[in-house]
Image (spheres, helix red, strand yellow):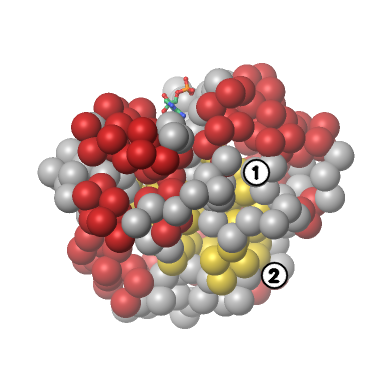
Amino acid sequence: MTDQPAIELNNGVRIPQLGFGTFQVDSDETQRIVETALEAGYRHIDTAAGYYNEDGVGAALKASGLARDDVFLTTKLRNGDQGHDSALAAFEASRKALDVDVVDLYLIHWPTPTRWLAPETWRAFEKLLADGAVRAIGVSNFLPHHLGRLLETAGVTPAVNQFEIHPTHQQPAVQDASRAAGIAVEAYAPIGKGEDLSEEAVEAIAQAHDVSPAQVVIRWHLQQGRIVIPKSATPERIRSNIDVFGFELTTGQLDALTGLERANRLFPNPDEFEASQFRD
Ligand SMILES: NC(=O)C1=CN([C@@H]2O[C@H](COP(=O)(O)OP(=O)(O)OC[C@H]3O[C@@H](n4cnc5c(N)ncnc54)[C@H](OP(=O)(O)O)[C@@H]3O)[C@@H](O)[C@H]2O)C=CC1
Ligand SMILES: O=C(O)C(=O)[C@@H](O)[C@H](O)C(=O)CO
């Protein structure tokens, strides 16, 4: 493992704080960009059954020649596979596609509150954890009331909540509720799908440090203790997005970025997103 910051999860497992996202990339391209990412030094890859590219991630891992223990792999359960037995079957399919024995972090992708199958899904996740098939279990897109509802019946507290956080949409109440429950906060769409990079404050801070706007925003997440998983399919950006350990933002610069909040949601509201994520 390269010398990068890690966060200790609530069960003692350590996750590299900076990871690499793979949403909206097909399998072949995923293999190429994950190979580039691993060469650049990323040791944490984020995928999902619903991205239909887990096999590309697995192929890149094999091709890299890195030891399995040196790379932290996260995948997620598709909404349509929630339920106890269906989650266990879907996990086996993900494990096969990734071509690994153990997944480091397995997430319930969305709460799907109308169907609300989280309690029985979570029992399956707890079994996978007890069996050693996964090292940590968590959730994604859970708002405070979804966390509260899950915790009423959960035996194991989720290790991670992965949700949308970038300068123009930070969801402070979700961050606070997650942390208060001992759940690590992981930022997805961390640079606002690229859209937050043209904010004047971001550009000014980038100029001051002679770095890119993306490096500034990634650094803002890291200095605030969040796990962060930027995606890029562009080799130069893949490399520069991890080159963020040679400068530090001042408190004033952190505050200026936090001041960009304007509830600018780019992904669905978790209270409304019930899509199965099946392809057909
Ligand atoms: N749990 C969930 O529901 C969700 C999880 N995720 C996860 O989070 C990851 C990251 O989120 P994502 O939605 O991909 O968005 P990001 O915020 O990571 O932004 C990705 C976009 O920014 C561009 N970009 C990347 N680096 C730079 C740079 N240095 N300069 C300029 N533009 C740049 C990319 O372009 P290009 O690729 O062309 O370089 C791409 O268009 C996902 O890939 C996925 O793994 C995301 C959404 C939902
Ligand atoms: O990227 C993800 O992980 C997602 O779950 C979402 O992008 C979701 O699948 C979607 O497509 C929202 O429109």
Find disc 1 in the rendering and name its residue: 42
Q: How many marks?
A: 2
- The answer to which of 205 and 101 lies nearer the viewer is 205
* x and y percentages locating residue 63 in the rendered image: 82, 32
- Could you say which quadrant of the image residue 125 lies in? bottom right
The three-letter code of the residue at mark 1 reads: Tyr
Q: Which residue occupies 75% across, 55% down?
A: 1
Q: Residues within 10 Å of mark 2 (few under 14, many from 20)?
A: few
Q: Is residue 177 visible?
A: yes
- The answer to which of 164 and 212 lies nearer the viewer is 212
Q: Which residue occupies 68% across, 23% down?
A: 32
The three-letter code of the residue at mark 2 reads: Asp
* x and y percentages locating residue 27 in the rendered image: 63, 24
Q: Which residue occupies 76% across, 48% down?
A: 100
For the residue labelled by badge 1, is the local secondary structure a helix, a strand or a loop?
loop
Find disc 2 in the rendering and name its residue: 131
- Position of 115 with respect to 130 (left or right) is left
Can you say whether 213 is above or below 101 in the image? above
- The answer to which of 76 and 253 lies nearer the viewer is 253
Q: Is residue 50 visible?
A: no
- Position of 268 with respect to 2 (left or right) is left
Point out the tag, 1 or 2, that comes first from the N-terminus.
Answer: 1
